[in-house]
Image: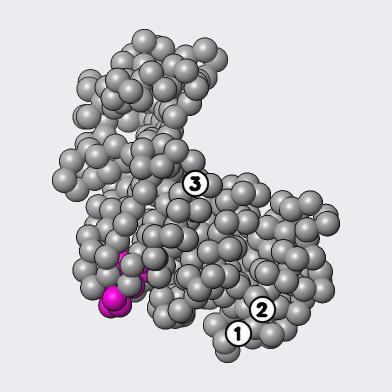
Amino acid sequence: MKVQEILQFLVDNDGSDIHIIPESPLSIRINGVLSFPAGPQLLKADQAQAWIFDLLSDKQQAQLKEEKEIDLAYQFNEWARFRICVYQHLGSYAAALRLIPQTIRTVDELALPQVFHKFGTYKQGLVLFTGPTGEGKSTSLAAIIDEINHTQSQHILTIEDPVEFVYQSDKSVVSQREVGKDTHQWELALRSALRSDPDVVLVGEMRDLETISSTLTLAETGHLVFATIHTNTAAQTIDRIIDVFPSHQQGQIRQQLASVLKAVVSQRLVPKIHGGRTAAIELLFNNAAVANLIRDAKVFQIDSIIQTNVVAGMMLMESHLLDLHRQNVISRETALNYAFRPTDMLRLLEE
């Protein structure tokens, strides 16, 4: 079997991920569930390496051998693109591949809340998407970015590692930069962004103090910035950003974040009763009350603000899970399993 056949199998079966790991069965993920299409047979290290190296250029192979890991994007065919993470596993090479659809679905096609259309209308500020890897953040962001692309005259700049969705300039012009390919470092690309005359900037990941600081500066200097960060709740996201900085800088960062933040979206993909997955959302919009809590280091009170501003489009994860359950989209068990606050979720289900 060739690795291209494995990729085609995933595409044909609407899968999302492939795992190539020596001494484990070849595995794919469909609707969030891992399966073994080739049976329980364990992969040998040389077979895994042959498949992996077939996806890498000579330069990428050399980089992998030197650094022991590499992230890249791989164009499979006209309709499918993969994000690939190659790493060492017990002295051998392993890889995780994620399918990136070439067709960018809209906010409505993804069944996302209607308030998502609001994000593209902001003229400046910071919109954060949070959640673990594989929860649909990139897909939701692509829907918003492409909506801007098709409806507004803007210069959109994306900085990613690697580039995932590829945009075709429409009413907007789109520049896409891949770290390691089009720029050496996140910090250099973010610094350069200030001189590139962008209106909208997508930062693939705020991963450390430098990228977080540069992203805040971009949002503060008149740009609309979208970024992702690996946290859970909206409140945890704000704390995570502030806690990255030394204590003597945190007061200043609180002021800066309170000023530039527009919204925080926490997203999970949850299994539907009749197959497939749907997005469950926690959504915080910044307002005067939220900004004051950020400045005063009272982020722990933000959940209460969300609960009392439902009419403004805010919602806790548990509220959205409850709505999905009442609509018979997800089961009671799923609602409990994916809740950030299980005790609150149980109380809502029993009311």
Quadrant of residue 18 within the rendered picture: top left
**Colour pattern:** one colour
- The residue wearing badge 2 is 306
Q: Which residues are magenta?
A: 144-153
Quadrant of residue 298 within the rendered picture: bottom right
Left or right, residue 77 beside residue 187: left
Q: In this picture, is 105 found above or below 81? A: below
Look at label 3 and name its amino acid.
Leu
Q: Spatial distance from mark 3 to mark 1, Cα to Cα?
A: 40 Å
Q: Are marks 3 and 1 in contact (CB under 8 Å)?
A: no
Q: Nearer the viewer, residue 59 or 143?
A: 59
Q: In this picture, is 149 found above or below 68? A: below
Q: Name the residue at the bottom extreme.
A: 311
Q: Name the residue at the front extreme.
A: 195
Query: Mark 2 or mark 3, which is nearer to you?
Result: 3
Give x and y (percent) for residue 330.
Answer: 49, 64
Q: Are marks 1 and 2 in contact (CB under 8 Å)?
A: yes
Residue 110 visible in the picture: no
Query: Mark 3 or mark 1, which is nearer to you?
Result: 3
Q: What is the magenta segment's predominant secondary structure?
A: helix
- The residue wearing badge 1 is 310
Q: Which mark is residue 188?
A: 3
Look at label 2 and name its amino acid.
Ile
Please, what secondary structure does the residue beneath circle 1 have? Answer: helix
Residue drawn at point x = 61 percent, y = 55 percent: 212
Quadrant of residue 130 within the rendered picture: bottom right
Does 184 appear in magenta? no
Q: Spatial distance from mark 2 to mark 3, Cα to Cα?
A: 36 Å
